[in-house]
Amino acid sequence: MMEFINFYLIPGLALGSVYALGAIGISMIFGILRFAHFAHGDVMTLGAYGTLTAVWMSGLHPLLALPAGIAFAILAALAVDKVFYKPLRDLPTIYTVIASFGVALIFRSLVQLIWGTQNEVFIRGVQKPIVLFDLIRVSVLHLESIAVIVLAAIALHYFLTRTRTGRSMRAVSDNPELARVAGLDTEKVVRSTWIIGASLAAIAGVLSGLDTNIHPNLGWNLILPMFAAAILGGIGKPMGALLGGMVIGLIEELSSYTWFTDEPLINPGYKTATAFLIMVILLIFRPQGLLKGRLF
């Protein structure tokens, strides 16, 4: 039982936290701007490298240097929206989707040009786990990831339900034309969407980099499970994306547990494919997701 908790359940929650943070931005961008943002993973990568640069310059712990990475990701997201996406908003959605692939390639190429193609790490050496009751061994990073997603869930729920900007975002997501006629500042809503999405993406990028390492394909390798999480929760539903991310992360980790025999249920090398399988099944049988989000 302790092996299940230490090596499968807690890592699954931590992985789900990363997916959830990225999926929230994907879901919000689709809900407000009505397109699938395939460059969102590369925004995560930019946030991770921005934080890494701040760590190199200041010597701070990555979580303390995180505001620098968040600011870098926000600036990049706002810049590409103004330069690439805004001129395409009145055109069919497919134009913006294709543009997002181009933006992803631009971001990745810039990372390779500025920071190189080699792997980097935030903290060198082996981090000792926390031992509770002489039974549970928990990685500090996993605890940090779980704590971050809990705080993000509370803050996001408060923002969307209790602030004027949050209520405006929900109104634009439900009916953009009616919100515009009602006098809501839709451009402010768009900016807020990019700011929140890029901030959460940068946090996810740093947490993922702390767990493994940092490389130019860091966010791109996570884009599929994040989209699966957004679809599972209900596209356009931020809290649904959070739920979907946790579910996808848990399923990935628990799928390699020895449930029925001494062998893993699914070879660990293939566990990432479970996210793709879940996404396909949902698109066929329940495309609106768990919380009945928008259809593509």
Image: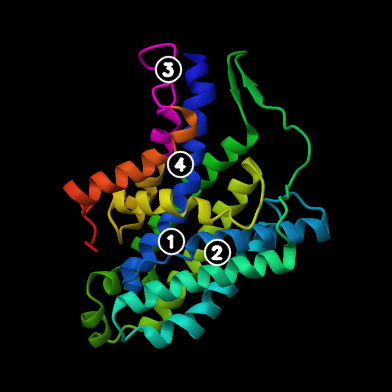
Q: Residue 52: tell me if it is visible.
A: yes
In the rendered image, which residue does mark 1 sit on? Answer: 25
In the visual, does 247 lie left or right of 111? Answer: left
Image coordinates of residue 20 in percent, x first then y, are 44, 49
- Which comes sooner in the sequence, label 4 or label 1? 4
Pointer 1 local density, CA inside 10 Å: few below 14, some 14–19, many at least 20: many
Kind of residue indicated by mark 1: Gly
Q: CA distance from mark 2 to mark 3?
A: 36 Å
Q: What range is drawn magenta here?
A: 247-266
Secondary element at tag 2 = helix
**What residue did someone put label 3 on?**
258
Question: Which dot marks residue 16?
Answer: 4
Which tag, 1 or 3, sits closer to the chain's start? 1
Quarter of the picture holding the C terminus: bottom left
Q: Relative to 25, is 237 on the left or the right?
A: left
Say few, some or many: other residues with alpha carbon within 10 Å of mark 2 (under 14 / 14 to 19 / 20 or more). many
Residue corresponding to mark 2: 43
